[in-house]
Image (cartoon, rainbow, N blue to C red):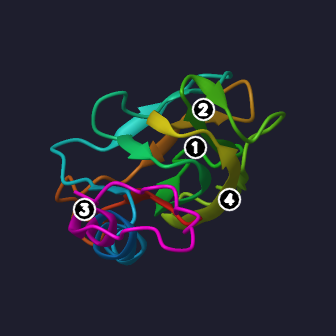
Amino acid sequence: MSPAWHTPLTWQVDQLVTEADLNSQLRDNLGFLKNPPTAFVSLDEQTDYVTSSNDFVDADRTRLALSLTTAGGDLLVVFFGMLRNPSNNGGGSLDVALDGSRTGKDDGLVGIDTGSTHWQPVSFCALLREVPAGQHNLHLQWKRSHRSGAIYMSVGAGTTNADYHPQFWAREIS
């Protein structure tokens, strides 16, 4: 867990500097900068995930969910994994919901071209600007882009030659 961030003091001439001042202003703030709020998940499940939704839905509301408390500022959100469309009839999109609201708008943060029945690497790195201080929840969301078929995500289910473990993480960077 990251130390708390303390708003830097404006020092006055002849102001007595206490041990508590030094600890909060130097030790705690440097500790916060060295170890910013971060949330991370890597999956190792029994069954690969699948969606046939035409609308954005959570990929896994429990396991592909991040929770972190920020001091306020920018968040870096990253996902990488392997996806495929076994029927070879189109792709889909990925997005992130921050506190229940999608961040990518329109068709999401990244399109998935699964024009092959083989597993395809998919990733994104998104900067979420000016996120207010406080507790935040992030959920990976996805949808298919065609009206038929399904999109699959490898989640470490032990499939021979396709046992991939996706990662989803966020870190405060400002």
Q: Amino acid at mark 4?
A: Leu
> Viewer-nearest of labels 4 and 1?
4
Q: What whole-number distance in Å separates the C-alpha atoms at marks 4 and 1?
A: 33 Å
Look at the image and give the residue range highlighted in magenta.
1-23
Q: Earlier in the sequence, mark 1 or mark 2?
A: 1
- With 122 as the anchor, is 92 left or right in this view? right
| Disc 2 and disc 3 in contact, CB within 8 angstroms | no
- Asked whether residue 138 is in view, the answer is no
Q: What whole-number distance in Å separates the C-alpha atoms at marks 1 and 3?
A: 63 Å
> Viewer-nearest of labels 1 and 3?
3
| Disc 1 and disc 2 in contact, CB within 8 angstroms | yes
Q: Amino acid at mark 3?
A: Ala
Numbered circle sitting on residue 127: 4
Q: Give the residue drawn at x 15%, y 44%.
A: 46
* Pointer 1 local density, CA inside 10 Å: few below 14, some 14–19, many at least 20: some
In the picture of the structure, the residue carrying the numbered disc 3 is: 20
Q: Residue 26 at x, y = what percent?
A: 36, 76
Q: Is residue 29 above or below residue 55?
A: below
The secondary element bearing badge 2 is classed as loop
The secondary element bearing badge 4 is classed as strand
Q: What whole-number distance in Å separates the C-alpha atoms at marks 1 and 2?
A: 6 Å
Location of residue 11 by image quarter: bottom right
> Viewer-nearest of labels 4 and 3?
3
- With 131 as the anchor, is 78 left or right in this view? left
Numbered circle sitting on residue 87: 1
Q: Is residue 46 above or below residue 157?
A: above
Q: Earlier in the sequence, mark 1 or mark 3?
A: 3
In the picture of the structure, the residue carrying the numbered disc 2 is: 149
Numbered circle sitting on residue 23: none
Q: What whole-number distance in Å separates the C-alpha atoms at marks 4 and 3?
A: 34 Å
